Amino acid sequence: MIPAGFLAKRIYSKPDWLDATRVTDIYSVSGCVSPVFDDYVDYWRHNGFWLFDSPRVIQKIAREHSIDLTGTTLFYYEVYEKEFDGDSWRPYGPDPSFQTAVVVPTDKHLEGYDVVTFFSRNLPECSPLSCNYLARELPTNAHCLLDSFEIAEANLTNRAFKDSEPGPYRIFSVYTVDWPEAS
């Protein structure tokens, strides 16, 4: 897994339409259910994975643009170095037109694994486990994430995501981290 970066998100409880009894809230990488702190792409400070290299970058954007981060959860992500196009696995890496220098947190808590679509090939689009109700069919944890990389990889290879959103699909490990003290 490759260090991919950070996002601040507002975590929402499981929506009523997602009939998955194990799920209590949504920690997906996509912002479809639990939104990202702002339309962050507009600030053009993201890295080649279309995430942020450090929490400090997010905090600086928030200060400069009067964005309230109160109540957000800070996530750190790593991404598998291959993506699944629906038929086969292909190498994947950051967009080379953006600098990528992710600061790996020393203290992180693994929450699970998400499968995310990247039809436009840049920022995270949909997480079919929540966006397309696949959590009703695939066993997820309370945060609507898969328990292991191997489960995510097997479900993709076995085409469990086939009729959800168009790919390619990328596997992310999802971690929660504590916010650093504001500087």
Image (cartoon, rainbow, N blue to C red):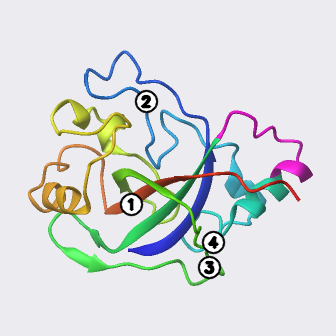
Residue, disc 2: 25
Side of 52 where 85 appears, left or right: left
Q: Quadrant of residue 139?
A: top left
**Which mark is nearer the camera, 3 or 2?**
2
Side of 115 where 79 appears, left or right: right
Residue 118 seen: no
Residue 63 belongs to the span the image colors magenta: yes
Residue at figure coordinates x 27%, y 48% from the top left: 146
Mark-to-mark CA distance, 2 and 1 = 18 Å
Could you say whether the residue bearing mark 3 is in a helix, strand or loop? loop
Q: Quadrant of the N terminus?
A: bottom left
Q: Position of residue 27 (x, y in %)?
A: 45, 41
Label 4 near label 3: C-beta < 8 Å? yes
Mark-to-mark CA distance, 3 and 2 = 30 Å
Mark-to-mark CA distance, 1 and 3 = 17 Å
Residue 171 seen: yes
Residue at figure coordinates x 68%, y 42% from the top left: 37
Mark-to-mark CA distance, 1 and 4 = 16 Å
Q: Residues within 10 Å of mark 2 (few under 14, many from 20)?
A: some
Residue, disc 3: 100
Q: Amino acid at mark 1?
A: Phe
Side of 150 where 23 appears, left or right: right
Residue, disc 4: 47
Q: Position of residue 170 (x, y in %)?
A: 34, 63
Side of 62 where 78 appears, left or right: left
Residue at figure coordinates x 25%, y 35% from the top left: 135
Q: Amino acid at mark 3?
A: Thr
Q: Nearer the viewer, residue 109 or 172?
A: 109
View extreme (front): residue? 107
Q: Amino acid at mark 2?
A: Asp
